[in-house]
Amino acid sequence: MAGLLDGLESLGLGNLENLDVFAEEKKQAKAQGAAAEEKKGPTEEELIYDKEFDCPVCGKKFTAKVMKSGKAKLLGTDADMRPKYEGIDSNKYDVLLCGRCGYSALVRYHGNLLPTQVKLIKDNISSNIKLKKYDEPTYSYEQALERYKIALANAVVKKCKISERAFICLKTAWLIRGMKEAGVAENKISAEEIASYEAQEKEYLKNAYQGFYEARSKENPPIAGMDNATLDYLLAQLAFRFGDYGTSLKMVEALLMSRESARIKNKALDLKEAIKEAKAKAGEA
Ligand SMILES: [Zn+2]
């Protein structure tokens, strides 16, 4: 078959006869394809790094894997504000744990401890804990869950504010939800395991709800980094989740009447609709 440029030879341009007319575009398309391939986003391993911390209990340095927050892309949040990132479950990387003495806390709360708290941790955690060694480049869900449990044990032992304990419970519930979702996405877990994850998530969420509810009347904002409106919105969501529609609606109404931002009011409006629907459904049943 003749080429598009056949006949150029008679014009003295024979060396151009066999050129591919769309070569440049084909090259560009190929390059774009490769770029799109790369755009799939960084892997979990690429989104974390080892960071060094000073342990306030044993005084030594330890490292923990933390997320490069500037590099990870936020895809959205669940109704109860659990953040979802592309390529990584950020909740896996929020607990710091000293491999020497077992002191552990959420990144937000790690740092200064009272001397009495240091003693409590040394006596009740450091002297007993037997930590496992992990060498994988990322934290698995099982490992992350273990870190949350150690952080919660530390929180109880050091007699911290109720909001800190509630926040650990909330984030543990989020972690378990992520664990279930990953298992479902990879087709790796049975219906029984799904039910078990959901039961565990519910238990942690319930403790978070009760803890934050109590913290709201005993502590001053910001509570676990949340202002009043954000905390009330979270409480309204949790109350809704546990079928306490009366409490949920009361908090939503208060948010709608307040001078809060449109962002939180819109979320409150959505929740109000959901409560109405759920109540109607409950009425029908
Ligand atoms: Zn330590």
Image (spheres, rainbow, N blue to C red):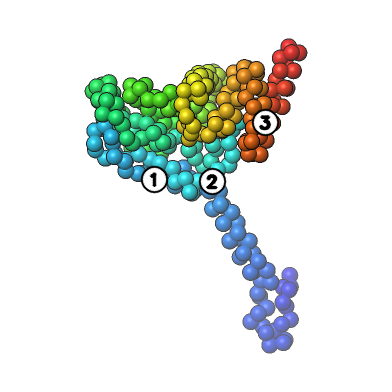
Q: Identify which amino acid the numbered label 2 is placed on.
A: Lys
The residue carrying mark 1 has its beta carbon less than 8 Å from ligand 1? no
- Decide which of 148, 46 is in the foreground and name it: 148
Name the mark nearer the viewer: 2 or 3. 3
Q: Quadrant of the N terminus?
A: bottom right
In terms of sequence position, does the residue under pointer 2 or pointer 1 come before the other?
Answer: 1
- Decide which of 225, 218 is in the foreground and name it: 218
Measured as percent of width and height from the top left, residue 55 is found at 28, 36
Tag 3 residue: 256
Marks 2 and 1, how far apart at CA: 16 Å
In terms of sequence position, does the residue under pointer 2 or pointer 3 come before the other?
Answer: 2
Identified at 37% across, 31% down, the residue is: 105
Tag 1 residue: 49
Tag 2 residue: 73
Measured as percent of width and height from the top left, residue 146 is found at 39, 27
Measured as percent of width and height from the top left, residue 3 is found at 72, 73
Residue at the outermost top position: 285
Q: Is residue 169 left or right of residue 137?
A: right
Identified at 49% across, 27% down, the residue is: 170
Measured as percent of width and height from the top left, residue 42 is found at 49, 48
Identified at 62% across, 17% down, the residue is: 244
Kindly check if marks 2 and 3 are in contact, taking CB atoms under 8 A apart as contact.
no
Mark 1 falls on what kind of element? strand
Placement of 251 over or under 23, stated as above or below:
above
The residue carrying mark 2 has its beta carbon less than 8 Å from ligand 1? no
Marks 1 and 3, how far apart at CA: 42 Å
Identified at 62% across, 24% down, the residue is: 251
